[in-house]
Image (cartoon, grey):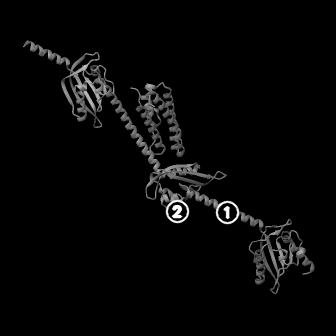
Amino acid sequence: MDLTSLDFQQAKIKQVLFKSRLRSVLYGVREADATLFAVRDNPLGQWLETILKPKYGTSPEVRTVERLLQDALSTSQTLVRQYQRGQIEEARQGLATVERSTDQIDALLLQLAQRVTGEA
Amino acid sequence: MNATASDEYFDLFHALPDKYLLLSPTGIVLDLNDAHAASSLPQRRREEVIGLDFFEVWPPSSDTEGDVVRRSHQHVRDTHQPDTMPLIRYDLPLPTGGYEARFWQATHFPVLTPAGELRYILQKTEDVTEKHLAEVHNEQMQRELAETHERARFVLEAVPAMVWTATPDGKRNYFNKRWLEFTGLPMQEQTGNQWMASLHPDDREKVRKQWAEAVTSTNIYQVEYRLRRADGQYRWVLMRAVPHLNEQGEVTVWVGGGTDIQDQKQMVEELLEANEQQAVLSDQTYRAYQSAEGQRDALRTLFTEAPAMFAIFRGPEHRFEFGNQRYLALFEGRYREGMPVAQAVPEAVEQGFVELLDNVYRTGQPVSGNEVSLTIPSLDGAPHQVYLNFSYQPFRENGQIAGVTAFAYDVTDLVHARQRLEEQRHGNA
């Protein structure tokens, strides 16, 4: 079955979920666990692996998205360590860096979605 | 005392290190020593002023000045007691014209005769201009310092945050109004380490440790904890403090501040919950969609390849939506998607099929028929007749009739066979 806009909506929701989990750790609402930073446990990472890569694994967007996700995850890990060391404000300000990566991921997935589904 | 001794005493008087002026009881200048003359008579010689009235030698620059001196002289005359004048400004004339501002501290002492009468008024004068100006300057500095303090205090009170200060060893010594209002406790119940009593018991130890570490290391202090509000509710606050260091790198004061982040935290938590639920729902929807898509494909295959005729008509005009291979074959490709039945197969109107469709669509009651004859004019001109067993069933969407499904199978061969059988019977009979 070809990918539809529903698939890309899924990706977006998973990305928001990841950001929300990270934010909740940096605001002391949840404890961090290692799965937060692992690509294979990340909701968007799983989506990439199971939905996107089997079909479009060779497209340049997918490779860039993978790299950006990896960047976002390692930045997240740094921020959580900062937070745990007591650099609370600095860690929260660092969310903007993660946001930059995820914004780029959004843009690339949108671009890919338009090409794949033929929808604007 | 002989003349020589008297001269020596005069010399001694002239050489005294402080400034002395000797007046008669009426205020005539009798003598003044060198130190006095040096500062009070910069342009005149002592001999020129002896025998003149005090005010002639040193005319006051204002009535007020003159009065102060006059009153002091009079006090000595009246009481035979020394009198220290209030600090006066008694400007001295400058060689270039005008006056130079000078401030004086002068005391008039009575010198009495053995009989107790006033013989002289001895003025001891101190030029306190430098000291006075320094004091004035100092007072101004103090005033400015006080204003700076007042401004700093105002800022601490006015900022929309809870603010406190602590001594270098970590004892809190000030809380602003916002903190006091938040906790509902007076300052004296919070200074030192007492403020920790307002912390949530689960957070107290952690905060105590972190504060102690910050004080020792003089690193920035940053911590989140639950602080008891005046209404008894614990609210999460974010506190941050920085030490102020002097030139030697020693802490002079800690300034801390923070805000209530309870709502912020709650919002983050609610957002996370909403996002988690959304992700779960979206996964469910996605799986349902995939499963529906699979079922749809299976059904489509089934319908398409079924050994019967099947079609879907939508809306009051019975627009063609779907027909399987056998159905389309029967009508020789006259159906196009979205085309009303009456337009695609005008014969169906004449033969009463459209009326049946109308009834089903309107009433929701299915109809069926067995071995119903339908004549279809073929594209090549020769009409052919078929017999169908059929049923029209309404289908609904959102509880409303949306269209009609048609199911039929061709029984023409069966009917023809029976007809032939009957003919044979008639023949035999």
Residue at image x 53%, y 55%? B160
Would residue B57 appear left or right of B362 to someone viewing this image? Answer: right
Picture quadrant of residue B270: top left
Q: How many marks?
A: 2
Spatial CA distance of label 2 from label 1 is 28 Å
x%, y% of residue B51? 88, 79
**Classed neighbour count for the residue bearing mark 1: other residues with Cα under 10 Å, few (<14), some (14–19), many (≥20):** few
Picture quadrant of residue B330: top left
x%, y% of residue B371? 18, 22
x%, y% of residue B227? 47, 54
Select label 2 or label 1 by which is in front.
1
Confirm whether residue B172 shows in the render: no
Which numbered dot is residue B188?
2
x%, y% of residue B42? 86, 68
Front residue of this view, candidates A2 and A62: A2
The kind of residue on which mark 2 rests is Gln
On the same chain, marks 2 and 1? The answer is: yes
Q: Is residue B60 above or below residue A59?
A: below
Residue at image x 54%, y 58%? B176
Q: Seen from this angle, which residue lies furthest bottom?
A: B115
Which numbered dot is residue B142?
1
Front residue of this view, candidates B74 and B411: B411
Q: Chain of mark 1?
A: B
